[in-house]
Amino acid sequence: MDIHNITLRAISQATESEDRVRTALSLFLSGEQIEIINTEGHFGNPISILQARIKGKDCSRFIELFGSKLSESELNRLKNEASDRVDDDCTLHIRFDKQAAYKGTMQLASTKDAISVEIKLKAYPARQENAIATAEKIFSKIGN
């Protein structure tokens, strides 16, 4: 697999159920531990950041999972936007709809209320253009 690791992160606002956010995040995981970081928002409101890291062979399972659960149009959107989604650190950024994930559905986010996914790509040498090629290679394998 052309991936070092995958980090998933979701924020639970004070008005949200942390258990519901955990359920949404769990849609993407297969036994990985969810870490909870308690902090404060801009106005002093309590927020929890739930995150998990996927490593090794589980990265392939994650790619297969979202490849099988996303609609064809959303997979095409990711393929077309690969160059915009990979940063200078060779990380591919995807945001999934948190409410849809809670309901067991995987779809790309259209709001800020999202599960953010950072996929650290293997690219040698580690340059953005090489990482974009890696992302395009991953996307070409899924959906076929």
Image: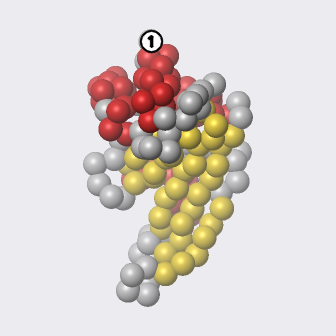
The answer to which of 73 and 54 lies nearer the viewer is 54
Residue furthest front as drawn: 125
Please state if 31 lies on the left or on the right of 92 as rendered.
Answer: right
Q: Residue furthest bottom?
A: 44
Looking at the image, which is closer to me, 90 or 110?
Answer: 90
Above or below, comparing residue 19 to residue 136 in the picture? below
Q: Which residue is drawn at 47% across and 64% down?
A: 11
Residue 111 percent coordinates (x, y): 29, 54
Up-down relation of residue 48 to residue 142 (above or below): below
Residue 95 seen in this snapshot? yes
Dot 1: what SS? loop
The residue lying at 34 percent from left, 47 percent from top is 109
**Residue 104 x, y percent position in the rendering:** 47, 43
Q: Nearer the viewer, residue 84 or 18?
A: 84
**How many numbered marks appear?**
1
Q: In this figure, which residue is indicated by the disc labeled 1?
A: 144
Task: Name the amino acid, label 1.
Answer: Asn
Give the image location of residue 98, x and y in percent: 42, 53
For the N terminus, which image quadrant? Answer: top right
User: Residue 53 vs residue 137: left or right?
Assistant: right
The quadrant in which residue 44 appears is bottom left
